[in-house]
Amino acid sequence: MIVIMEPQADQSQIERVVDRLKEFGFDTHISAGVERTIIGAIGQKNELQVQQIEAMQGVERILPILQPFKLASREFRPERSQVKVGDVVFGGTHIPVIAGPCAVESEEQMLAAAQAVKDAGAHILRGGAYKPRTSPYAFQGLAERGLEILAWAGKQVGLPVVTEVLNPRDVERVAEYSDMLQIGARNMQNFTLLREVGMSRRPVLLKRGLSATISEWLQAADYIISGGNHNVVLCERGIRTFETETRNTFDLSAVAAVHELSHLPIVADPSHGTGKWRYVTPMARAAVAAGADGLLIEVHPNPEQALSDGPQSLRPEVFAQLMQEVRRVAEAVGRSI
Ligand code: PEP
Ligand code: MN
């Protein structure tokens, strides 16, 4: 349930309500909005407890949260959340672009990619050091050396970096090297990993699972938020359907649905969403038009030599053209890139 405080409720009233909820065995999460504070209370409730809380000073009313996801829900936080990665903000009128290769392959490759995406106006550099490959025989990433190269390339060009963490044991190490932690589609329901990044203070980019419903995805976000990490950005990257012409079916309706159901920002990834570089720019334009709060685009200095996801990776000049096109769409919908 959520406890909605009166706009004029003071700090001591809020604290008393939190203490009482804890006595009753609830886990509490405070959301301080511009107008009022909302306290999320997660746990088994009974009628008497609800009445007693409702009677406390400073409490306006109590609402049950009917959705299976609670902390990620719009009921818990009516205003849109903003998530900061360095100076980059997700969830405002500006639309950040995350770009870079699928995998970190070498210093030269990473620096060339970093320079190219920076020159074209990207805001965050990406590159995988731990790659979740379908085949155990495919390139698995450079591991810690990859993290070092990514962090180094980001510093060279002055961009914050995001990279995937595959294993709960690696969360701390990956957080040392990167400004944002990516949870890949295949790990969206790796609950141990979600709990671990929930304990980190690094912002998290939570990709939608290959066959996950929006509700399951938002419940995964609840795992992270309930650990105390409120800095969650969702990423739509396409889902499995019967269609084989594209790698996945890029579900742009998720952008509209997430905005209605949740306060969390949502980024769109047309690279994994389509799997073909020629479809990336049109779908990036569509994502911005649909209201996405960010884009994730795979860019490789030499896609035909990429060790992973070459067919969906943009050459630097194609990425530069994409940036110009999405800027025009952003302006048309009252936003900027
Ligand atoms: C990636 O971002 O390179 C990646 C592996 O994405 P996903 O988890 O969406 O497949
Ligand atoms: Mn990839």
Image: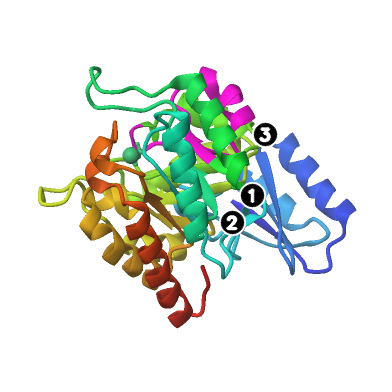
Are dots 2 and 3 in contact, CB under 8 Å? no
- Ligand number 1: quarter of image: top left
x and y, in percent, of residue 296 in the image: 41, 52
Q: Is residue 331 left or right of residue 303?
A: right
Q: Residue at x 46, y 56 (%)?
A: 266
Report the number of numbered marks. 3
Separation of residues labelled 2 and 3 (CA atoms): 19 Å
Image-quadrant location for residue 26: top right
Q: Amino acid at mark 1?
A: Gly
Dot 3 surroundings within 10 Å: few (below 14), some, or many (20 or more)?
Answer: some
Is residue 42 rendered magenta in the image?
no
Q: Give the CA distance from mark 2 to mark 1.
A: 6 Å
Dot 2: element: loop
* Image height of 56 relative to 133, above or below: below
The image's mark for residue 76 is 2
User: Which dot marks residue 25?
Assistant: 3
Which circle's residue, 2 or 3, is located before the other in the chain?
3
Q: Which residue position is annotated with label 1?
A: 40
Residue shown at 37% from the left, 53% from the top: 316
Q: Tell me how far mark 1 sits from mark 3, CA to CA.
A: 13 Å
- Looking at the image, which is closer to me, 255 or 155? 155
Residue at (39% x, 41% y) in the render: 101
Residue segment shown in magenta: 162-186
Amino acid tagged 2? Phe
